[in-house]
Amino acid sequence: MPSSPGLFYQRRSSFLRSSTARIIGFLIVLTGSIIGIIAFSRQGLEYKCKYEKPLSVSVTWDKSSSSRDGGISDDGQKRHKVMGFVGIQTGFGSVGRRRALRQTWFPSDHHGLQRLEESTGLVFRFVIGRTSDKIKMSALKEEVAEYDDFLLLDIEEEYSKLPYKTLAFFKAAYALYDCDFYVKADDDIYLRPDRLSLLLAKERPHSQTYLGCMKKGPVFTDQAKMVGEMYEPLSHLLGKEYFLHAYGPIYALSKDVVTSLVALRNNSFRMFSNEDVTIGSWMLAMNVNHEDNRKLCEAECTSSSIAVWDIPKCSGLCNPEKKMLELHGKDICSKSSTLPSGDED
């Protein structure tokens, strides 16, 4: 007996619903698979990209070498061309400072740091030496693996040896990077990388430039007397004048100046207890132009400040771990627009 029209349409409707459900289910499974494959691929690419080209580098010293690079072994690597290298001098007791910096103007992730360097033309690395303390070295190794933002020097990390570390830094940076400027900065200052980039990019009539927030001290203090002994031909010219040098928290040397420093034999110049005095005294022996810029030593953030620290109370921020975060929370510090280069004069 033939089926009734009503029963036919009911079966047909059930079949269509069943087919539609199967198709929708298949599409859902297929879409999920595609999304999973894409996500996995991206994760793999990000992992590969993150570790394909490590940013951190350890510089070894060839004691037998008398080469122009100061005995630095770079395994034949080509020097990278950038506008400037900024070495943030740090130590084993400054874990908190580095943490504060990575929460403010110094990007904590690999890609963020690369973007900053691409936008400013400046390379940023924490600079640290070594210690015989295995626990501290192990902790440093873990930090390097996590953040990948260090220049490791094969020199003992001691406060009394800061002048040696500074010279080692300039030699290492010169061996790795071909820069217009090499910048030494401490890990307890608040820095505006975009404004520093504009400052370094300015046209200058002098190829040998010593750039910083300059200060004057009487020449014939105990240390300056030694400067006079080092450069006896200059003593009669100095008289009761003043010995000009940059404050230690941040200063920059042009390529020609660093080239001259690198060419020096180790221990050929006297080392003083203060690193900024040591560098300043060496500048007396070179035909450098002292470029004084007060934007590198402002006590508060302004629309044009480049480096902020508690001058003259402290040689840096007095409480850097706390003050760094407070400054970064102010729009005038972290979010104010960068001034055109013409306004930086």
Image (spheres, grey):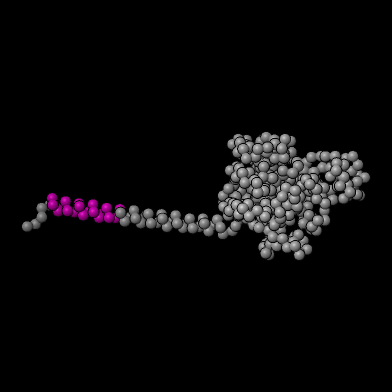
Depicted 102 relative to depicted 26: above or below: above
Instruction: Identify which residue, 244 or 39, lies in the foreground.
Output: 244
User: Which quarter of the figure has residue 323?
Assistant: top right
Residue at figure coordinates x 27%, y 55% from the top left = 22
Q: Is residue 102 magenta?
A: no
Residue at figure coordinates x 34%, y 55% from the top left = 29
Instruction: Identify which residue, 229 or 49, lies in the foreground.
Output: 229
Depicted 196 relative to depicted 1: above or below: above
Q: Position of residue 59 (x, y in %)?
A: 68, 58
Q: Position of residue 345 (x, y in %)?
A: 73, 40
Judge whether residue 92 can be spotted in this image.
yes
Left or right of 66: which side holds 151? left
Magenta-highlighted residues:
6-24
Residue at figure coordinates x 23%, y 54% from the top left = 18
Q: Residue furthest right?
A: 236
Q: Position of residue 127 (x, y in %)?
A: 67, 51
